[in-house]
Image (spheres, coloured by chain):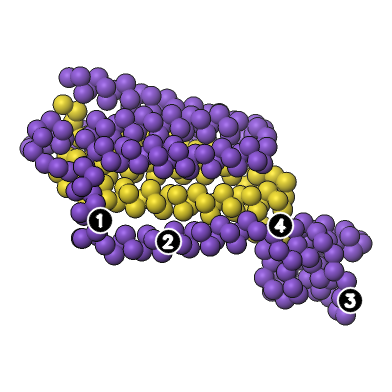
């Protein structure tokens, strides 16, 4: 039987990798994917607790987190396309000024 | 026993794919590595006796979201990231020290939790005494106790639809209207607020391009005072 702490450690490791990716990456799409990784790490925690505590609430919240992630994907990729149209580049350092 | 072995294999796959995702410099390769992470996590959800979440993980994440990401990567023809020189050398020892402190904290937490007296919990699948994780129980919870968050989520999706359409379309903005990113008609007074009375309009992708077309030989005026 797998102890609950193993799942929590795995989730923490994945979240840390995602956070490091957001800080290290300069490409807007890569940063977006790292955010998705962090959301998934949190989802793993929710499902693990839900399963070990026999409470369905955690899985409901995973469902809602997934919905938010899908909405974020639609809007975020729309913003990325708009930035690319304006600047011909996805480098976030070049998009540091929002107005021009 | 078999569960532990499966967990270790899947966890190693997830961590390996995640590290590969961050290490890759081609966004398409990192997208494929991220799909590997999603599939591994989906298998872990099956291990945790959550078949509905596992299916939704594959359908929504690996199916819908990653297809959208890969589509955008292909559409924009994203180039590989160039490696940059590290600028702030003096921060490296600080970062190592802070990471050591963080790892020590986490190790202490794990140690204190593992050594404290507690009733060991078991996951759902091992005893088969509950219906947690089945689609029926999730649907019941979603439509009874958590009906309000569910409805708010639907409003959120509506906002996402409207926002995505607004961001993605190309329109000619009338003078004075808000500027939508993308190709647009820019009146003279938006490019250079100090020149009034010139009603010429040009079509340009950026304000700077419009300034070039208008032949303004100075850089784009700073609007910091607005």
The numbered mark, 2 or 3, whose residue comes first in the sequence reads 2
Tag 2, which secondary structure?
Answer: helix
Q: How many neighbours does mark 1 have within 10 angstroms: few (below 14), some (14-19), or many (20 or more)?
A: many
Residue on which disc 1 sits: B142
Q: Residue at x 42, y 40 (%)?
A: B61
Residue A10 is situated, as x and y percent measured from the top left of the image, at: 32, 32
The chain displayed purple equals B
How many angstroms separate mark 3 from mark 1 (CA)? 59 Å
**Label 4 with label 3: CB-CB less than 8 Å:** no
The numbered mark, 1 or 2, whose residue comes first in the sequence reads 1
**Label 4 with label 2: CB-CB less than 8 Å:** no
User: Does mark 2 fall on the same chain as mark 4?
Assistant: yes
Where is B191 relative to A10, above or below? below
Residue B102 is situated, as x and y percent measured from the top left of the image, at: 35, 38
Residue B171 is situated, as x and y percent measured from the top left of the image, at: 71, 64
Q: Residue at x 75, y 62 (%)?
A: B184
In-image side of B143 versus A27 (left or right): left
Furthest-front residue in view?
B136
**Label 2 with label 3: CB-CB less than 8 Å:** no
Residue on which disc 2 sits: B156
Question: What is the number of callouts on the image?
Answer: 4
Foreground tag (2 vs 3): 2
């Amino acid at each position: 039987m797998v102890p609950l702490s193993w799942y929590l450690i795995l989730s923490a490791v994945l979240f840390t990798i995602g956070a490091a990716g957001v800080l290290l990456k300069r490409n807007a799409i890569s940063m977006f994917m790292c955010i998705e990784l962090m959301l998934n790490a949190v989802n793993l925690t929710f499902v693990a607790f839900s399963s070990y505590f026999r409470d369905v609430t955690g899985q409901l919240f995973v469902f809602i987190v997934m919905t938010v992630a899908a909405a974020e994907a639609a809007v975020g990729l729309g913003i990325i396309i708009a930035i690319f149209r304006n600047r011909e580049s996805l480098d976030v350092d070049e998009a540091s000024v929002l107005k021009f | 026993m078999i569960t532990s072995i499966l967990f270790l294999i899947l966890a190693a796959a997830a961590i390996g794919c995640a590290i590969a995702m961050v290490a890759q410099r081609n966004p398409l390769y990192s997208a494929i590595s991220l799909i590997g992470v999603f599939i591994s996590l989906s298998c872990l959800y099956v291990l945790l006796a959550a078949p509905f979440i596992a299916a939704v993980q594959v359908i929504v994440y690996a199916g819908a979201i990653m297809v959208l990401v890969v589509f955008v990567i292909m559409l924009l023809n994203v180039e590989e990231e160039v490696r940059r020189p590290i600028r702030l050398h003096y921060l490296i020892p600080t970062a190592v020290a802070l990471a050591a402190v963080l790892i020590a904290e986490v190790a202490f937490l794990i140690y204190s939790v593992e050594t404290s007296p507690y009733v060991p919990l078991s996951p759902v699948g091992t005893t088969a005494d509950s219906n947690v994780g089945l689609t029926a129980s999730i649907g019941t919870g979603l439509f009874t106790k958590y009906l309000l968050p569910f409805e708010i989520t639907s409003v959120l999706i509506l906002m996402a639809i409207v926002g995505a359409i607004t961001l993605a379309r190309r329109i000619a903005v009338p003078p004075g209207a808000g500027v939508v990113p993308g190709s647009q008609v820019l009146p003279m007074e938006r490019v250079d607020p100090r020149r009034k009375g010139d009603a010429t309009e040009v079509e340009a992708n950026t304000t700077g391009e419009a300034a070039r077309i208008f032949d303004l030989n100075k850089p784009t005026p700073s609007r910091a005072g607005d």
